[in-house]
């Protein structure tokens, strides 16, 4: 089946690390994505990971993939107030179709 | 390089009318997908076009349709609008068809039905 689940809310202090978790169900997914959405805007592609990788690092972002447990996480180091947004996890299914989670609201307190 | 461009940004329509939304992909991208975002249902896949052909379709009624032109620009049309069609409609483009291409989104068209 096609289902992606995320926790709904995360609150952190500025300068701390944020970890957003996601689980997915389709084992045939080839790519898994993290998108960021700010108020009134579209989706900004943050990073993505191929399903045969277990980790990808890109500046302050670290993606960990546990394919056995179908678990994906996004770690944001040194979280800033500008990181406050909704973060969506998505898996690619059957071509370019993306199945999204409900989104995690990240609130960064200064 | 310009990103994905969607027009218009905002639209207000009444029930029963029809609407056409436009999407210009990133230059060189040949695949365009459409998504609907609502508070209740989240982000849902509508359809994907590649080489002017619909390649994939989500679970939406036939009132939702789309097309793609030879320059890869795409339009989606919703006929006989209902209140529940109020949503943010997002377009995404990728370089090619297939799940190994990252998708880049536009800022969306916010459609309000009165």
Image (cartoon, rainbow, N blue to C red):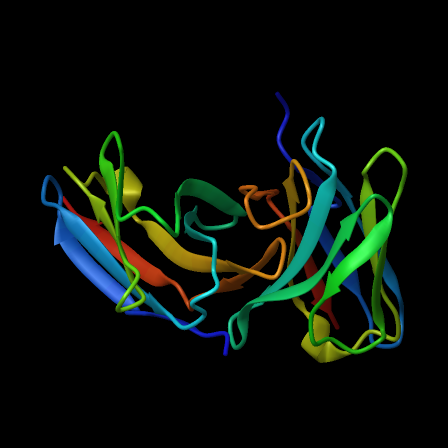
Instruction: Examine the image and state in which quarter residue B70 appears.
Output: top right
Instruction: Examine the image and state in which quarter residue B48 appears.
Output: bottom right
Q: Residue at x 72, y 78 (%)?
A: B83
B4 in relation to B35, above or below? above
- Left or right of A59? Residue A95 is right
Where residue A58 sits: x, y (%)?
A: 29, 32
A2 in relation to A86, above or below? below
Q: Nearer the viewer, residue A44 or A63?
A: A63
Q: Residue furthest top?
A: B1
Where residue B105 sits: x, y (%)?
A: 58, 44
- Left or right of B92? Residue A33 is left
- Left or right of A51? Residue A40 is right
Q: Residue at x 69, y 52 (%)?
A: B33
For the image, the number of numbered tags is 0
Where residue B77 sits: x, y (%)?
A: 85, 60
Where residue B23 sits: x, y (%)?
A: 75, 43
Q: Nearer the viewer, residue A61 or B114?
A: A61
Q: Residue at x 68, y 39 (%)?
A: B96
Q: Residue at x 45, y 74 (%)?
A: A3
* Image quarter hosting the C terminus of chain A: top left
Q: Nearer the viewer, residue B64 or B48?
A: B48
- Left or right of A28? Residue B80 is right
């Amino acid at each position: 089946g096609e289902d992606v689940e995320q926790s709904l809310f995360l609150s952190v202090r500025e300068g701390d690390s944020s970890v957003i978790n996601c689980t997915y169900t389709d084992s045939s997914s080839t790519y898994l994505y993290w998108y960021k959405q700010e108020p009134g805007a579209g989706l900004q592609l943050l990073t993505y990971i191929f399903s045969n990788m277990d980790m990808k690092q890109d500046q302050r972002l670290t993606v960990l993939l546990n394919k056995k447990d179908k678990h994906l996480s996004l770690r944001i180091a040194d979280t800033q107030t500008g990181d406050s947004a909704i973060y969506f996890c998505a898996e690619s299914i059957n071509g370019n179709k993306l199945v999204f989670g409900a989104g995690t609201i990240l609130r960064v307190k200064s | 390089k310009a990103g994905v461009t969607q027009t218009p940004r905002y639209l207000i329509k009444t029930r029963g009318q029809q609407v056409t939304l436009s999407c210009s992909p990133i230059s060189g991208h040949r695949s365009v997908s459409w998504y609907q975002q609502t508070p209740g249902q989240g982000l849902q896949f509508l359809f994907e076009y590649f080489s002017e052909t619909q390649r994939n379709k989500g679970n939406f009624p036939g009132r939702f349709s789309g097309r793609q032109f030879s320059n890869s620009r795409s339009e989606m049309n919703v006929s006989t609008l209902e209140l529940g069609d109020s949503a943010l409609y997002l377009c995404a483009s990728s370089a090619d068809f297939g799940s190994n291409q990252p998708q880049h989104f536009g800022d969306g068209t916010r459609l309000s039905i009165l």
